[in-house]
Image (tube, rainbow, N blue to C red):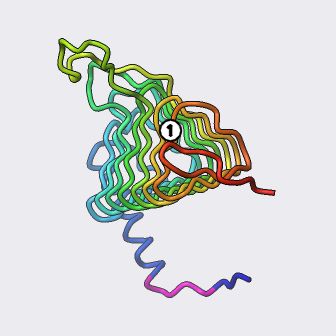
C-alpha cells in the first residue's frame, strides 16, 4: 500500500528557487529560458544542441554536456541526479550521433552517462546511484601502440521502456535491453540482446529469473 503525503511549503520554495536559478542560467547565456530547474552548482553545456520536450531537473553539481553531439532529446520530466555527469563526447574530434531519452526517466546521484556511438533510452526508466552507461569502447588490437592512441569503436546502446537499474550497474557498448527488466545492483551488462521481463544480475550479467 502506498500513501501520498502533502508536501511542505519548503518543498515548493525549493522548486521555485531552482526554477529561478534555471531562468537566470539561460538568460546569462543569452538563451531563452526553458522549462529547466537547476540545483546549486548545476551546469549545462552545448545548450543549442539540446531539445527539451518538457520539464527537466538538473541536480546539484551535476553536468549535462551536449557539446560535440549532433542532437540530444530529453523527454518530459527528465531528471539528472546530484553530482551526475551526462557527457555526449569528451573530444571535439569525435561527434556523438545522438542521444534520445524518453518520458519520465530519472538518474540517481553520481551517475556517469556517455553518448558515444549513440544512446536511446525509452520511457519510465529508473537508474539508481552510481549507474554507468558507456556506448563506446577503446580499440586495443595493436600491442605496439598505447591504447589511448588507437581510438574508439562502438555500436551504441538501446534501452527499452520501464526498466529499473540498481545502484552501481554498468551498461557496456553494444547492449540492447528490452522492456520491464530489473537489473541488479552491481551488474555489468555486456554486449548483446538481453530481452524483456527479466531479472538480470552478475558480472557479466546473466538471467537470474523472469518477471511474470
The span shown in magenta is: 5-10
Instruction: Name the residue at 76% across, 56% down.
Output: 211
Number of dots carrying numbers: 1
**Which image quadrant: the C terminus?**
bottom right
- Lateral position of residue 52 relative to residue 38, left or right: right
| Res. 48 image quadrant | top left
Residue 19 rendering spot, x and y as whole percentages: 41, 63
Residue sitting nearer the eye, 164 or 52? 164
Residue 139 rendering spot, x and y as whole percentages: 33, 19
Residue sitting nearer the eye, 194 or 111? 194
What residue would you read off at disc 1? 51
Query: Residue 192, relative to residue 58: is it above or below?
Result: above
**Which image quadrant: the N terminus?**
bottom right
Instruction: Name the residue at 63% across, 43% down.
Output: 122
Instruction: Name the residue at 18% across, 14% down.
Output: 145
| Res. 21 image quadrant | bottom left
Instruction: Name the residue at 60% across, 52% down.
Output: 125
Amino acid at each position: 500500500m502506498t500513501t501520498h503525503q502533502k508536501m511542505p511549503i519548503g518543498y515548493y520554495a525549493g522548486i521555485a528557487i531552482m526554477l529561478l536559478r534555471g531562468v537566470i542560467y539561460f538568460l546569462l547565456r543569452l538563451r531563452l529560458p526553458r522549462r529547466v530547474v537547476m540545483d546549486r552548482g548545476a551546469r549545462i553545456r552545448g545548450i543549442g544542441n539540446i531539445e527539451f520536450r518538457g520539464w527537466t531537473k538538473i541536480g546539484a553539481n551535476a553536468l549535462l554536456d551536449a557539446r560535440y553531439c549532433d542532437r540530444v532529446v530529453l523527454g518530459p520530466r527528465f531528471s539528472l541526479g546530484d553530482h551526475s555527469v551526462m557527457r555526449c563526447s569528451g573530444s571535439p574530434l569525435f561527434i556523438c550521433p545522438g542521444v534520445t531519452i524518453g518520458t519520465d526517466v530519472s538518474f540517481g546521484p553520481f551517475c556517469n552517462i556517455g553518448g558515444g556511438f549513440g544512446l536511446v533510452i525509452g520511457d519510465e526508466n529508473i537508474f539508481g546511484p552510481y549507474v554507468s552507461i558507456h556506448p563506446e569502447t577503446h580499440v586495443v588490437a595493436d600491442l605496439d601502440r598505447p591504447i589511448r592512441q588507437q581510438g574508439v569503436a562502438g555500436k551504441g546502446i538501446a534501452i527499452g521502456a520501464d526498466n529499473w537499474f540498481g545502484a552501481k550497474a554498468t551498461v557496456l557498448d553494444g547492449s540492447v535491453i528490452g522492456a520491464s527488466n530489473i537489473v541488479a545492483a552491481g551488474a555489468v551488462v555486456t554486449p548483446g540482446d538481453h530481452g524483456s521481463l527479466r531479472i538480470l544480475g552478475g558480472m557479466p550479467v546473466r538471467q537470474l529469473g523472469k518477471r511474470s
